[in-house]
Image: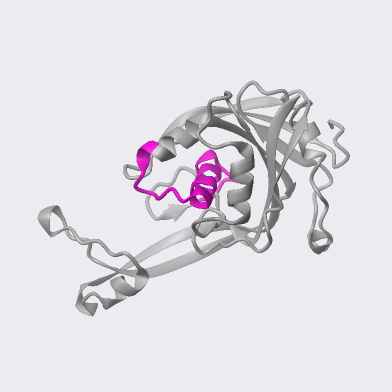
Amino acid sequence: MTKFLIFRLYGPMASWGDVAVGTYRPTFDHPSKSAVMGLLAAAIGIRRDEDVKLRTLAESYDFAVRVDASGTMLRDYHTSQVPSSGSGRNKKYFATRKDELAASQKDMKTILSTRDYYCDAVYSVCLWGKSDDVPYSLDNLAQKLKEPELVLYLGRKSCPLAMPVDTKVVNGMNIQDAFSSMNSDNLLDGLQKDDSMRLYWEGGQDAGVPALHTITRRDDPLSRRRWQFADRKEHFAVVQPSGRDD
């Protein structure tokens, strides 16, 4: 038996980041490792500039994601005004948007971009430690997700959670067994659900179903300050709501 932490992610909008070139900001169709680890880091109270703590967190746990409802794609033509950040000794730092707006209006620049989101998607997440020596126990993480130190959001600050994460720690024979402990929520019954669900997982943990294929994703966070990510292997399978493989 393995100990798993399971929780649910739902919001009106979510964006999970993909390789971004130029002004186009695409989204993957399910949560990335950097997004899940960032969510946990916010719950614990780890800040973005604490690279060592963030890297330790990412190296200590593997995770799986089940896409319960795919949602619908939304593409936004996005405009924003930002002041110049300066360079060298004249580098400027702004703690809040209010500070940015308080900067000289003559110094404002307009940034244009196209950003993708998924609307009304539902994801179930399963997390487990790679070893017995992890920085935070699963029970501690579960409690922090219920009472987070920092605001939790679904990939971007404009995408807050719309429901509690409904987190719990369970024992299971495999990932599918752990997901079978998820509570159904009547508040989500009105959403368009998929006939079958997609399951993604990393590492050598038994998923309870065979992988149909394995892909490489570059979303394992190395340094938030330098925006560096490492490759990882992600397995994929299709499962039925009852837990039977397709």
Residue 202 seen in render = yes
Is residue 46 inside the magenta stretch? Answer: yes
Query: In the image, what residue occupies the spot 80% across and 32% down?
Result: 177
Picture quadrant of residue 98: bottom left
- Report the quarter where the N terminus lies: top right
Give the image location of residue 92, x and y in percent. 20, 61
Q: Which residues are magenta?
A: 26-52
Residue 228 seen in render = no
Left or right, 123 with respect to 112, comes to right
Q: Residue furthest top?
A: 204
Left or right, 200 with respect to 133, comes to right
Give the image location of residue 165, x and y in percent. 67, 54
Query: In the image, what residue occupies the spot 71% across and 52% down?
Result: 166
Picture quadrant of residue 31: top right
Is residue 61 inside the magenta stretch? Answer: no
Query: In the image, what residue occupies the spot 52% across and 28% down?
Result: 232
Give the image location of residue 73, x and y in percent. 63, 57
- Report the quarter where the C terminus lies: top right
180 or 79: which is nearer to us?
180
Coloring scheme of the render? one colour
